[in-house]
Image (cartoon, rainbow, N blue to C red):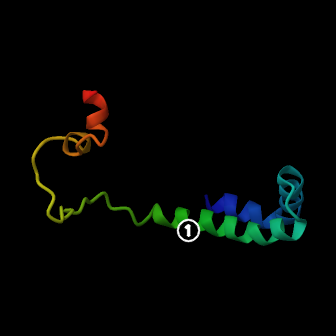
Amino acid sequence: MWRIADLIDENAEELAQLDSLNTGMPLMQAQLGLPNCAEFFRYYAGWCSKISGDAYEVKTAGMPRTPGSTCTRIPARNRIALWA
């Protein structure tokens, strides 16, 4: 992923022209978006060394721990239409 970010930086002008032709956006707008694209790749490449595989306990904030999906807890809104 680091290499992809470097390639985006190296070929920024050509990629901006292709993006401009493909999407119809102005060339200047395409040129302004490419550095962000390269930074996204660098950001996510950096996460590879930070993932430990640990899971954290999630607080349920008052939700009951009984089995049942959300659909079983929401009453039908058009119940009268079903009885007609």
Q: Image check: 25 left or right of 74?
A: right
Q: Quadrant of the C terminus?
A: top left
Q: Secondary structure at mark 1?
A: helix
Instruction: Please tell me in which quadrant of the rendered image residue 13 appears.
Output: bottom right
**What residue is drawn where x is 16% and y is 41%?**
68
Q: Position of residue 31 (x, y in %)?
A: 83, 69
Residue 58 in percent (x, y) is at 21, 62
Residue at (67%, 59%) from the top-left corner?
Answer: 3
Identified by mark 1, the residue type is: Tyr
Along the viewing direction, whichever of 26 and 42 lies nearer the viewer: 26
Q: How many marks?
A: 1
Front-most of residues 45 and 26? 26
Query: Of residues 49 and 31, which is closer to you in this image?
Result: 31
Residue 25, above or below 73: below
Residue 61 image offset from top left, x and y in percent: 18, 65
Residue extending farthest to the front is 84
The residue where tag 1 is placed is 43
- In the visual, does 40 lie left or right of 73? right
Q: Residue at x 64, y 69 (%)?
A: 39
Q: Is residue 63 above or below residue 42?
A: above
Q: How crowded is the residue under tag 1: few (<14 C-alpha within 10 Å), some, or many (20+)?
A: some
Position of residue 45 relative to residue 21, above or below, is below
Residue 63, how many percent across, how many down?
Answer: 16, 58
